[in-house]
Image: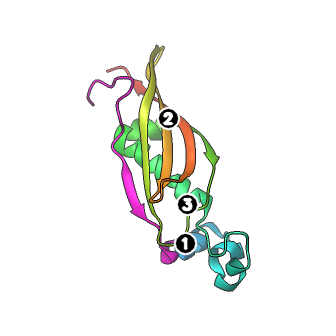
Amino acid sequence: MKNLQVGDELVPISKLITMKQILMYADASGDYNPIHIDEEFAKNSQFGKNIGHGMMVAATISELMVRNFADAWYKTGKMKMRFKSPVYPEDKIQTSGSIKKSENVETGTQITCSVQIVRQDGDTIISGETSVTLQNP
């Protein structure tokens, strides 16, 4: 792993959210809230159409951290997040982040990152902060 510095950008993740993914996530999670899976119900909601599951979208933050920090994320990762806006079928999202803080701790180097998921129109879907500890070699 390269020498990480405050301000470094993480390698981002881009995805297209599809209705098929939303339905598959409903099956995997058991979350069959009609706002996610029932088109007629969703049309009459405050959103006007189906929305993706927040946790399905938030999982891309974990994917981002694995891409950038490998198994250190599995062992030591922590995440705080705030849901700000829904994601809709056919939205393109980008999950990105940057290193906010790096500090030496007893077991290695703790990296704190600012992370966000943004939709193609620029709206922030989720914002948050992650931390991971990289073990000393």
Residue at image mark 1: 22
Which numbered disc covers residue 114?
A: 2
Q: Considering depth in this image, is 132 or 102 the residue closer to the camera?
A: 102
Q: Amino acid at mark 1?
A: Ile
Foreground label between 2 and 3: 2
**Circle 3: residue type:** Met
Q: Position of residue 52 (x, y in %)?
A: 58, 67
First in sequence: mark 3 vs mark 1: 1
Residue at 61% in and 43% down: 81
Instruction: Using the image, determine if residue 117 lies above or below residue 48.
Output: above
Magenta stretch secondary structure, dominant: loop
* Residue at the spot 57% in from the left edge and 49% down from the top edge: 126
Rendered location of residue 68, percent (x, y): 35, 40
User: Residue 22 appears at what percent x and percent y?
Assistant: 55, 72
Amino acid type assigned to the residue bearing label 2 in the image:
Ser
Does the CB distance between marks 2 and 3 fall below 8 Å? no
Q: Which numbered tag is attached to residue 56?
A: 3
For the residues marked 2 and 1, what is the alpha-carbon distance in whole angstroms? 26 Å
Which stretch is magenta? 1-22
Quarter of the figure with the N terminus: top left
